[in-house]
Image: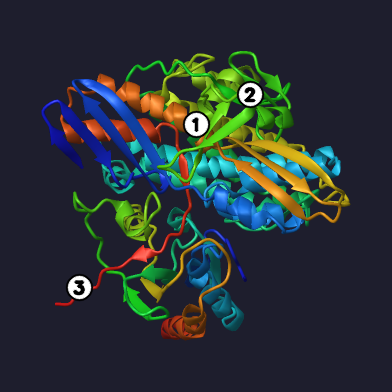
Amino acid sequence: MTGAGAPETASRVVVVGMGSEYRRDDGAGPAVAHRVAGHCAGVAALGPIAEPLDLLGLWDGADLAVVVDAVRSGAEPGTVRVIELAAEPERARADDPPGTTSTHGIGLAGVLRLARAVGRAPARVVVVGIEGADFGQGTGLSPAVDRAVPHAARHVMELIEEVG
Amino acid sequence: MTHGSGAHRTVAVDGLSRVEGEGSLRVDVRDGVVEDVALTIFEPPRYFEAMLRGRRATEAPDITARICGICPVAYQMSACLAVEDAYGIGVDDRITALRRLLYCGEWIQSHALHIYLLHAPDFLGCADAVELAELDRAAVERGLGIKRTGNLIMEVVGGRAIHPVNVRVGGFYRAPAPEEVAALAEPLRRARDAALDTVRWVGGFEIPEVDGQYRFVALRSTGRYPIESGRVASSDGLDASPAEFADRVVEEHVARSTALHARLDGRLDYLTGPLARYALNSGELPEVARQAAADVGLGPVCANPFRSIVVRAVELVFACEEALRLIAEYEPPEPPASEVRPRAGIGTGATEAPRGLLFHRYELDEAGVILTARIVPPTSQNQLTIESDLRRVAQAALDLPDDQLAWRCEQAVRNHDPCISCAAHFLDVTVVRG
């Protein structure tokens, strides 16, 4: 993957493949980021990244950060969603600790709030979610998710084109 | 969440915040006495052990690196040592030094993360790191700056900041050029100064006085603070090779958890991690780290789990200072890796992950294929001790209202920075239609 792991990236666009390829469909994010990296020179494609806190320092100052991740929402496996994260800082609610959107210590939303609190958030963060079916141990995407990878990559590349 | 009334009271925390991965804990109280505590964790090494069977031993460093998003280098290093032990491979001192430098990068990343974003909020009355950033933005920026320096080391030596790709059995794919390594010195000097500020900062926290009465277990190697190698020592006299130690650690399955609970000689619980490393090796710290510890009243042994944040900060100073030493003495290993010739055998490797002793043991056939794998992470070794801490802390805090009692129990878990580990991390998404 090109430019993987470059801190303080000079790129205006960062594509992050969240997930682990050893948890089946959880590898969808890295698969999409890898595909985008092969098509878009000059874009910092990072991943696989398993820990949202790792984004701190990696996405600093980007005009656009696209976070590609497997999601579980009850939709049909392979469904692709593009979710624009709010531009305004979100306040945490007492019943909404940072970990609730992720099984990690601090999830993506919490990390974004933290980045904003210290003035290092990307100008724009978009999540491209791919509905997963199988998050069990092992490698390889399930068929519907595998078919959705190029579709999701197209969404990411359209977002990159918008930035110009 | 708490429930129960009268004599029977249950405190349950279903989603532990600010520990790596997933976990929950439950405390049962009956007639004013803590009857049972259970830390339930979901830990993937067991699945990786199964996945490794039939794979080539040379794949073990990269596969096991994916067990944890926070400490991939620890998994890579323990895997390399185990396979090299089975193959009877020795490595050049310059390779060992480069491994130690890479590992310093991971310690710096991991300790900065835990101190600033996961642990410090407990002592400052903040719900999380975001609240801390609003209260003291400069402190969080300092922590993130230190973490970025760790990222830099990982990138230069490991090939990238996250999940290094430059590590292989026998050494490295490529040795970084001297000028690349030398360029790390300036940011590291700044990080060391920030780490010294960190010691002073956490040294000023109000910390409860608790004596954990631990049996400490850590690596020990003469003349240096342990990171990437050593024999296994304990506070009650153990001195064993990693292979002997692995034979003496018995793990038992507990129904509530996918992790195994480890006991020494099948009966003794013990603690690995910063408190153990420090207690058994504080005399090996460089002067700057020893002085920083002394300045905040930290003696040569610390058995207070709440004070582990101070010990971690001292280790942060050490990791920066050690990285600077290694950079000053750096000579690229040539070749960058020892030759690897498969042979049948059993090998064990043990290193000090940021959160404690991590050992791997592989049985390999003559073609270098893994027949059996055993991976024992620090958290499963610490689990029984963490539960003992919980019992003690909960008993002492029974007068608190349930929510505060639950909070105190969470702190008791976070003191040990458990890597409850990286399971899947899909987002649970709920679509609300207006």
* Residue at image point 33% right, 77% down: A75
Q: Which residue corresponds to mark 3?
A: B432
* Residue at image point 31% right, 23% down: B393
- Which-is-in-front pick, marks 3 and 1? 1
Q: Is residue B124 visible?
A: no
* Residue at image point 41% right, 85% down: A162
Residue B31, image x and y in percent? 18, 21
Q: Is residue B307 visible?
A: yes
- Give the residue type that dot 2 points to: Pro
Q: Is residue B30 left or right of residue B178?
A: left
What is the quadrant of residue B12 in the picture? top left
Label 1: how many Cα within 10 Å (few below 14, some 14–19, many 20+): many
Q: Is residue B98 left or right of residue B71?
A: right
Residue B48, image x and y in percent? 59, 53
Q: Please state which of residues A79 and B70 is positioned toward the viewer in this rendering.
A: A79
Give the SS element for disc 1.
Answer: helix
Distance of label 2 from label 3 (alpha carbons): 56 Å
Specify the subunit that label 1 lies on.
B
- Give the residue type that dot 3 points to: Val
Give the SS element for disc 2.
Answer: loop
